[in-house]
Image: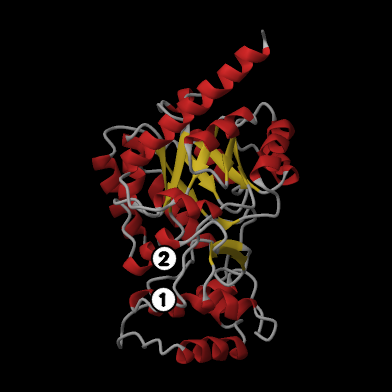
Amino acid sequence: MQTELSKTLGVEHAVFGFTPFPAVAAAISRAGGFGVLGAVRYTAPGDLKRDLDWIEAHVDGKPYGLDVVMPAKKVEGVSEADVEAMIPEGHRQFVRDTLAKYGVPELAEGEASGWRITGWMEQVARTQLDVAFGYPIRLLANALGSPPADVIARAHDQNVLVAALAGSARHAVKHKDAGIDIVVAQGYEAGGHTGEIATMVLTPEVVDAVAPLPVLAAGGIGSGQQAAAALALGAQGVWLGSLWLTCTEADVSAPAVTRKLLAAGSGDTVRSRALTGKPARQLRTEWTDAWDAPDGPGTLPMPLQGLLVAEALTRIQKYEVEPLLGTPVGQIVGRMTGERSVQAVFDDLTRGFEQAVDRINRIAGRSGK
């Protein structure tokens, strides 16, 4: 499953695996793909350094990358406390009422919320980069589009390729104009933040719009056959995230999350702003239903929503309150029916890819007679 891009990066398979788990990222690279560690949950530089040290020790010299979440324009001088002060009391009360309705216990006194997405903040994201550029990462991906120009320049100075996610051809062209190296065309089916256009439609549109830049297809890809379809549409690789959530190497904090993922079908996800304030595909739960209900207060814009619900989600996960318990995941969740190792996932991907290519070759051979 090689392309020009995978050869450039020195990987056997053009499979780019995004994950918040260091052990999964390392296993993806060892299996012949390209592991990408998500940095958004790291608020302390020491924690990110610890996990990058771990990856370095377990990746067997294979290449890997980092995914950050930072706006294209600098947002300086705004503290987390400043943002917290913008959250309306009515929304705070809605959170309290919802948790009380389901009997969600309080955290122990002095116990900090473990789920605070602050990586979008300028000072946090740049601190992450200061740490990451001390390691031999080969790729820097940004989930909020093109990084600031000085970040792109800094990456290129260190021979690091820069990727940006796009939900439309218009967005992809902006990334190309900004000087990024790879566009990830993320379709509607994908987990996490995603746009309105399906992968089958989006991928060839983006390929045509940004040629000759390489494009990775994301969303609705969980088998080798689907990977082959993405390459047939012009992509130079696939960007997979959801598929790794039920791998044995994943350090999922709440076992009930894994159980819910394995039981879910492709119709059991929803695009909701309940998590961060931007539309993000996730398991549909009574928590997302409460936020999306017409009589609810409505979600707040990013980053207010994420800060508002941080402690609540920590409590829901810690106490495994199943009706409210969810996680970002794509529609591919319907294929995730058992826990497997990363290597087993790769074996299945490559086997399915070969079968799909053989099938197309047979069809092409018959049509030429």
Q: Secondary structure at mark 1?
A: loop
Q: Nearer the viewer, residue 346 or 99?
A: 346
What x and y, as percent, mark residue 365?
61, 12
What x and y, as percent, mark residue 185?
63, 42
Asked if labels 1 and 2 touch by Cβ distance under 8 angstroms, the answer is yes
Q: Secondary structure at mark 2?
A: helix
Residue carrying label 1: 322
Q: Earlier in the sequence, mark 2 or mark 1?
A: 2
Side of 164 where 39 appears, left or right: left
Side of 351 where 171 appears, left or right: right
Tell which residue pokes out farthest to the left in this image.
57
Residue 192 seen in the figure: yes
Residue at 45 percent across and 32 percent down: it is 352
Above-or-below relation of 117 to 31: below
Residue carrying label 2: 260
**Residue type beneath disc 2:** Lys
What x and y, as percent, mark residue 202?
69, 42
Crowdedness near tag 1: few (<14), some (14–19) or many (≥20) residues, C-alpha within 10 Å: some
Tell which residue pokes out farthest to the top in this image.
369
Label disc, if present, on residue 202 of the rendered structure: none
Q: Nearer the viewer, residue 90 or 139?
A: 90
Residue at 40 percent across and 47 percent down: it is 132
Crowdedness near tag 2: few (<14), some (14–19) or many (≥20) residues, C-alpha within 10 Å: some
Q: CA distance from mark 2 to mark 1?
A: 8 Å
Residue 136 seen in the figure: no
**Residue type beneath disc 1:** Glu
Count of all numbered marks drawn on residues in the image: 2
